[in-house]
Image (cartoon, rainbow, N blue to C red):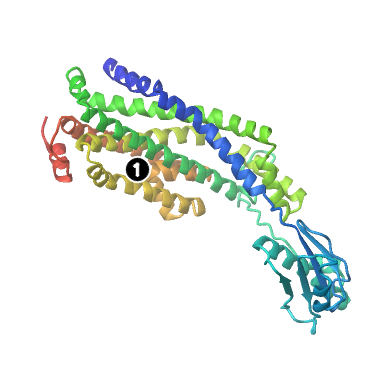
Amino acid sequence: MEKLWLIIKREYLTRVTKPSFILTTLLAPIAIGLFLVVVGLIMSYQGDDSKEIVIVDQGNMLERKIRDQRNMYFRFSDQSLEDILAKRPEAPFDAVLIIPPLREIERTRHTIFYHADEQLDIDGMIALQNIIEDKIRDYKIRTLNLDADQLAQLNTQITLDPEPLQETGDIDGQGSNPSPITSVVAAALGGLMGFVMYMIVFINGMMVMRSVMEEKMNRIVEVMISSVRPFYLMMGKILGVGGVGLTQLLVWAILIPLVAGGANLLFGFDSQQMVLDEASTEFATEDIEILISQVSSELSNLNWWLIVPCFVLFFLGGYIIYSSLFAGIGSAVGDDLADSQALTLPIMIPVILALYIMFVAIRVPNSSLAVWSSIFPLFSPIVMPARLAFGPPAWQIILSLVLLVLAAIFCVWISGRIYRIGILMYGKKGSFKEIWKWVRSKD
């Protein structure tokens, strides 16, 4: 164990103290902060091309009442298009909007004509259409002598509130009663955890394989094997590189919120406010505040004492499985990247499949595909974290963890048998046939 600890310490300190690691760890949050600022500025950009639009309302449906919109300014005219164009030098404008009269009040489609040298952009076209649609709707209501308030009361928004068949909460009955957005919050959290797990397992596994390939090509491993067993060398490398990845994630988890918050303060851009502004175009401000309150309540009601430890356990199990397999493949190939890509394909396929199954799991977490995939060891490190927020049965979590531990032990054993021979093989390309011989060979 002492030699294993020395290898872990060497792998960890060698990589953490590299200038490239320090620069990447520190500059990545800054790059993300700048990216958020640029995206925020782009998304908040509303254009600077203002248009003066003359409206010819031939049926007087708008009653010469319309508000100026963003970058669009309106004025009415009773003249014909030819007369308006003739007076253009005296009263400049950018476009003329002709609104023909509505011949039949029951018509549901109506065409208006936009005359301009330059056509409207998509946002401007949609905004103008919506304005005229609302005005014509008001005209129909007035013509048919309908009550606008009564018409508004005909619209009923349905909210599906799930309720348990039997009360399972506390004495006051307020225990684990789900709300209408419980599934949405759980799906968002599950998708986030599953994707983070995918990135961690995949990136760190590839990092272990590259490290093994580099040491094999530099012949450093020959010196190290003279004093330590190959199995300890492989496990030390896996655990050391895993510690590097966790350190980087921990630093990013601290720096990224700080950098993002600092960027918002420095540039005066608030991403949350931008989201609220965009949402307020379709929903009332009170509804948005209620939604935010419900989301916060749902997050606080989640069983974090189960989610966080299980997330860590599935991360460790998945990382050990795939990192050991990547380490075994890295020891079997040389500097030929084509060989490494061919041999890593069978390892990458389960990871990619698990990512796609994860998207199914957050939509239908209790389906047969989601349940059995979250139990299968090669899929469970990614699929099960996506289901944790939905509260899967305890037997599924326990069975998944047990199989994950057994699979991790088996993969480490297989990879160790490949590593002990492959790490000292030079001048011979690794193949599935050769690797199978190494696994079957006796000590």
Q: Residue at x 14, y 33 (%)?
A: 426
Disc 1: which residue:
377
Residue 141 location in percent, x, y?
84, 73
Q: Give the total of numbered labels.
A: 1
Provide the secondary structure element on which disc 1 rests.
Answer: loop
> Image point 47% across, 52% down: which residue?
359
Place residue 88 in its image quadrant: bottom right
Quadrant, the N terminus: top left
Q: Outermost residue, bottom direction?
A: 103
Indicate the amino acid at tag 1. Answer: Pro
Q: Residue furthest front?
A: 89
For disc 1, the neighbor class at 10 Å (few under 14, some 14 to 19, many from 20) is: many
Relative to 120, is 149 on the left or the right?
right
In the displayed structure, 25 sits above or below 439; it is above
270 lies above or below 90: above
Residue 197, located in which quarter of the rendered image? top left
Q: At 13% from the left edge and 36% from the top edge, which residue is drawn?
A: 427
